[in-house]
Image (spheres, helix red, strand yellow):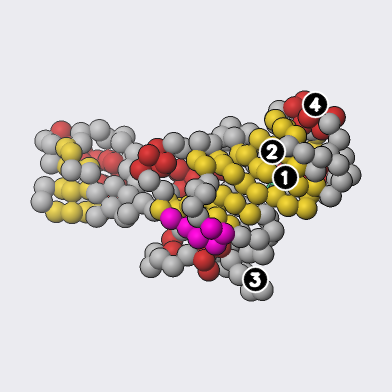
Amino acid sequence: MRLDRYLANRARLSRQDVRRLLADGRVQVNGEVSQIMDLEIRVFDRIELDEEVLQTGKAARYLMLNKPAGCVSATQDMAHRTVLDLIDEPDKHDLHIAGRLDFNTTGLMLLTNDGLWSRRLTQPTSLQGKVYLVETENEIDPSCIEAFAQGMYFRFENLTTLPAQLELLGTHHARLTLHEGRYHQVKRMFGRFNNKVIALHRESMGSLVLDEALSPGNYRPLTSHEIALI
Ligand code: URA
């Protein structure tokens, strides 16, 4: 919400009063005087009017989890363990998942309460590369490299996938870099070659790489450097 609208609602002031308050330097956002009427403010910002704290500013939370297999990428599920069951934090119910993984997919999963941050990663058109290690049931046909790089038409969504980079690591193993996040994308791409994905592991999202010190099921907060990478 814009700062002027927030102040008008929160302090029940007219637009004219708000303009005057701002011009007089009586409003502080995160400890600094702000006079910008259309400044976008968020739940994480601390807002003060004179000496009164109007909003304390919620702590933004960013966690990296090494998702184990056999666990649902959801915050609630009647039948199965969820990734949230692995988190032991008082405010865990404020968190959402930035980029889901299938039940048996393992690896890098990010949880946050910051919707703007997660949107940058998870919009279907987000160009942040997502890197997966793939193991397949059958030998990987080398023509996959060209087909994935060309893009693949998905009739259901009526779109062609963005060029993806496939690096063969062995007859049944590969590293695949996607630049978008479509539903079951990796499995559907290999499915075109009648090759079933039998293990899938996400190594990185954008410049954020899974911390190898995290064993499956464990998590840690992101560092400020990591948060700024997205
Ligand atoms: N693509 C898939 O098919 N599954 C995942 O979990 C992630 C990407």
As drawn, the residue found furthest toward the bottom would be 78
Give the CA distance from mark 2 to mark 4.
14 Å
Q: Residues within 10 Å of mark 3 (few under 14, many from 20)?
A: few
Q: Quadrant of the N terminus?
A: top left
27 or 121: nearer the viewer: 121
Residue for point 80% across, 47% down: 136
Q: Earlier in the sequence, mark 4 or mark 3?
A: 3
Tag 3: amino acid: His
Left or right position of 63 against 186:
left
Please check the rendered image and state whether residue 216 is part of the magenta-colored stretch, yes or no: yes
- Give residue 198's position: percent from left, percent from top: 78, 53
Q: Earlier in the sequence, mark 2 or mark 4?
A: 4
Which element is circle 4 on? Answer: helix
Res. 134 mark: 1
Give the CA distance from mark 4 to mark 1.
17 Å
Q: Residues within 10 Å of mark 2 (few under 14, many from 20)?
A: some
Res. 146 mark: 4
Looking at the image, residue 47 lies above or below residue 159: below
Q: Earlier in the sequence, mark 3 or mark 1?
A: 3
| Residue at numbered disc 3 | 80
Residue for point 45% across, 43% down: 117
Which element is circle 1 on? Answer: strand
Tag 1: amino acid: Val
Looking at the image, residue 11 lies above or below residue 85: above
Q: Earlier in the sequence, mark 1 or mark 2?
A: 1
The residue range painted magenta reads: 215-220
Which element is circle 2 on? Answer: strand
Left or right position of 130 against 145:
left
Q: Residues within 10 Å of mark 4 (few under 14, many from 20)?
A: few
Tag 4: amino acid: Glu
